[in-house]
Structures are given as C-alpha cells and as structure tokens.
Amino acid sequence: MTLAELEAQVRDIIDDPGKFRYSDTVFAFDATEASLEIVDALSLPSERDTSLSLVEDQKTYVLPADITRVVAIRLIPENGGNPGGELDEVLRAELPVVDDLTNRNLSDPKRYALISGEGTNEDQLMLVFEHAPRRSASNAIVIDYQIQYEFDGSADFATQNVPFPARYNYPMVHMTAGLLLKRSDDAADKARGESLFMEGKDRLGERAMLNSLSFWQDNYRSMP
C-alpha cells in the first residue's frame, strides 16, 4: 500500500476527501505515529539489507525505490563467502571521471558515491562506483539500509510505501484515522477518534500475537 492509498482510505473514514480539515503535512505526521506504533508492537528492526548483481563494465546502479538511507555498501568477494568490509562513501566529485583501467584490472571498487536518479528513476538513489567492476556476479553488491518508517508530507504520496505487509493495513488505516480525529475540538470527534485508534490497536495486538504464535510453532514444534 502506498501513502496515497492509505490517505484515500483514511480520509474516507473521517469524511475529509477535500483535505479541508487536515492538511497533507498533518496526515503524514499522524501516519508516521501510527507506523511507529506498529514498529513498537512488533519489535521490528531499524535496518535491513538487500543485494544487487554486480555487472562487468557497469559502474552505475539504481537502488530499489524503498531505499532512502544507505548505511553501508559491501561486496561479496570473487571467491564467494561473506561480504567484505564496508566500501568508502565519497562525494561524486571525488570519483574519477575516467576509469583507471589499471586499478580496474587489479581489484573490485573500493569507493562509491550516492547520487539522485535521473529520468524515470528521479525518485530513486543511484550507486556509482569509482570504476566499473571487472567481473559479473549475482547478488554481490550488499546494501545495508535504514528502514523508512516515517512519511514526508511534502513529497509525492504515490511514491512513498507503507513499510508493512497488507495484513497490517487495517491497524494502519484505523490508527491514523483515530489520531487525526483526536485532534478535533469537538467531543464527539475526539471520542470517535479514540474508538478508531483503539480498534486499530486491538487488531494490531491480535496480529502481533499471531506472529508470536507462528514463530513458536516454527521454532519449537519439534521439541518434546
């Protein structure tokens, strides 16, 4: 679900499709609060990793759209095994304009820069190595990144994803709607907001309990 889809459902519940009561900034703030409630309830990690394939003679790579804060870039060695140490991040201007072919033939890149995407990838980060790699290898670029649980009220809602599986849509929608309504000076609105928020939080608690049960079954079902 994108933030735009979340907003449509929330504004339908609180009868504010024209955004007369709550601005995009306020909506994004309360959506962030609801998101952090889910993070706390599920004890979710703050970082994650993913990988891209290394391509010979290709020095620029588009990162997945949900990566906005890179923690580290590492490469899996040519002989396999675990990723090596972190590469050094530098400014784009510090990377050579023309590849040093001597270095390219001797080793994998040691430095990289992150730049804004262009054209159809303008909303994504791009990774630029100091020189094109001399080899191709599946999933050899390991990217450690910070998970984005916060939303930007000034950015395009259609490009911001709610970072949870669809089973958490109900808690996310109802807690966000509840938080917005609780801002009202009207007592009836406040009461309805509290009810919506607790309805979403109760469903979240059920989901968290099911997750714990599934983990227990997966890990301990073979125990005597």
Image (cartoon, helix red, strand yellow):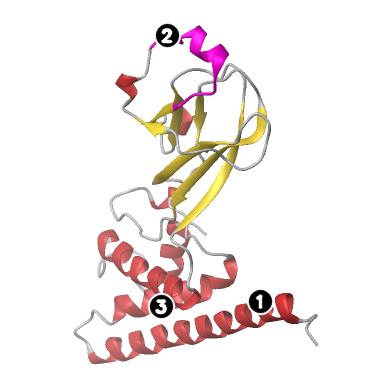
Which of the 4 image quarters holds residue 133? top right
With 222 as the anchor, is 6 left or right in this view?
left
* Secondary structure under the numbered disc 2 in the rendered image: loop
Task: Please provide the residue range marked out in magenta.
Answer: 97-110
Is residue 68 shown in magenta? no
Q: Nearer the viewer, mark 3 or mark 1?
A: 1
Name which residue lies at 48% across and 17% down. 131
Is residue 102 shown in magenta? yes
* Secondary structure under the numbered disc 3 in the rendered image: helix
Kind of residue at disc 2: Val
According to the picture, the residue beneath numbered tag 1 turns out to be 215
Name which residue lies at 40% across and 75% down. 37
Residue 119 pos. (x, y %): 44, 27
Quadrant assignment for the C terminus: bottom right
The answer to which of marks 2 and 3 sits earlier in the sequence is: 2
According to the picture, the residue beneath numbered tag 3 turns out to be 175
Residue situated in front as seen by the camera: 210 or 166? 210
- Around disc 3, counting alpha carbons within 10 Å, would you say few (fewer than 14), some (14 to 19), or many (20 or more)? many
Which of the 4 image quarters holds residue 223? bottom right
According to the picture, the residue beneath numbered tag 2 turns out to be 98
